[in-house]
Image (cartoon, rainbow, N blue to C red):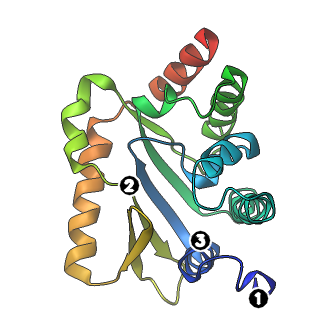
């Protein structure tokens, strides 16, 4: 990880470190596929519209995100619970529909893993989107047993460790989870949208 310092933000390095030590990762994304599930082509389309669009920086960011994804395929992966608003499944990255088709196929593959409980918040539950901002809850393995909430706000990530605030974020996450489709119905919806794209 040290060789990336100076090229990757301190917040991104901290996030990757927390993911490495995680027993459980919970995330809510209202508008885009979470970083741990993005395919390289999707990543490049997102990066292409941002300040890091220059080729060398873009490659560094894609490589870094791909390295973070290895946490889900290691021998002792964390339990991963992503909740995606249904809009995420329709929000195309770039002009090539094949990218979104491939991205949806990747979501369907990951959703079948035993340690992943991917849920979709359907359009019929859009009233829950007023909770709005993307956030992560990362519960660390012992001996730490700490849960950190990471809230994304425009160009920065805020790391929250205060127990009361984290508890409030956990309560919000559980409310979103209760409104989301179950695991089977979520996978069916992903497959249905993929077949139409």
Q: Which residue is mark 2?
A: 134
- Location of residue 165 (image quadrant): bottom left
In the structure shown, which secondary structural element does the residue marked by tag 1 occupy?
helix
Q: Nearer the viewer, residue 78 or 45?
A: 45
Residue at the (25%, 41%) spot, across then down = 129
Q: Which residue is mark 1?
A: 2
Q: Which of the labelled discs sits on residue 147, or is there none? A: none
* Quadrant containing the C terminus in the rendered view: top right
Which callout, 1 or 2, points at the residue further toward the start of the chain?
1
In the structure shown, which secondary structural element does the residue marked by tag 2 occupy?
loop
- Location of residue 164 (image quadrant): bottom left
Horizontal arrangement in the rendering, residue 130 relative to residue 67 (left or right):
left
* Tag in front: 2 or 3: 2
Residue at the (52%, 90%) spot, across then down = 143
Q: Position of residue 34 (x, y in %)?
A: 54, 50
Above or below, 132 relative to 149: above
Q: Which residue is mark 3?
A: 19
Residue at the (60%, 51%) spot, across then down = 115
* Quadrant containing the N terminus in the rendered view: bottom right
* Tag in front: 3 or 1: 1
* Neighbours of disc 1 within 10 Å: few (<14), some (14-19), many (20+): few
Horizontal arrangement in the rendering, residue 15 relative to residue 41 (left or right):
left
In the structure shown, which secondary structural element does the residue marked by tag 3 occupy?
helix
Q: Position of residue 38 (x, y in %)?
A: 65, 46
Q: Position of residue 194 (x, y in %)?
A: 61, 18
């Amino acid at each position: 990880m040290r060789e990336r310092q100076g090229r990757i933000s301190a917040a991104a390095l901290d996030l990757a470190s927390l993911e490495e030590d995680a027993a459980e990762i919970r995330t809510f994304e209202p508008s885009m596929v979470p970083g741990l599930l993005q395919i390289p082509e999707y990543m490049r389309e997102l990066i292409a519209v941002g300040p890091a669009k220059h080729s060398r920086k873009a490659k560094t960011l894609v490589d870094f995100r791909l390295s973070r994804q290895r946490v889900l395929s290691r021998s002792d992966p964390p339990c991963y619970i992503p909740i995606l608003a249904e809009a995420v499944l329709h929000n195309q990255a770039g002009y090539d529909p094949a990218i979104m088709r491939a991205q949806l196929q990747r979501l369907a593959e990951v959703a079948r893993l035993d340690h992943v409980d991917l849920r979709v918040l359907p359009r019929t539950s859009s009233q829950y989107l007023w909770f709005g901002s993307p956030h992560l809850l990362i519960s660390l393995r012992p001996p730490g047993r700490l849960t950190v909430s990471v809230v994304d706000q425009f160009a920065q990530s805020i790391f929250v460790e205060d127990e009361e605030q984290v508890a409030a974020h956990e309560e919000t996450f559980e409310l979103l989870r209760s409104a989301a489709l179950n695991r089977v119905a979520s996978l069916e919806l992903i497959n249905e949208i993929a077949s139409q794209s």
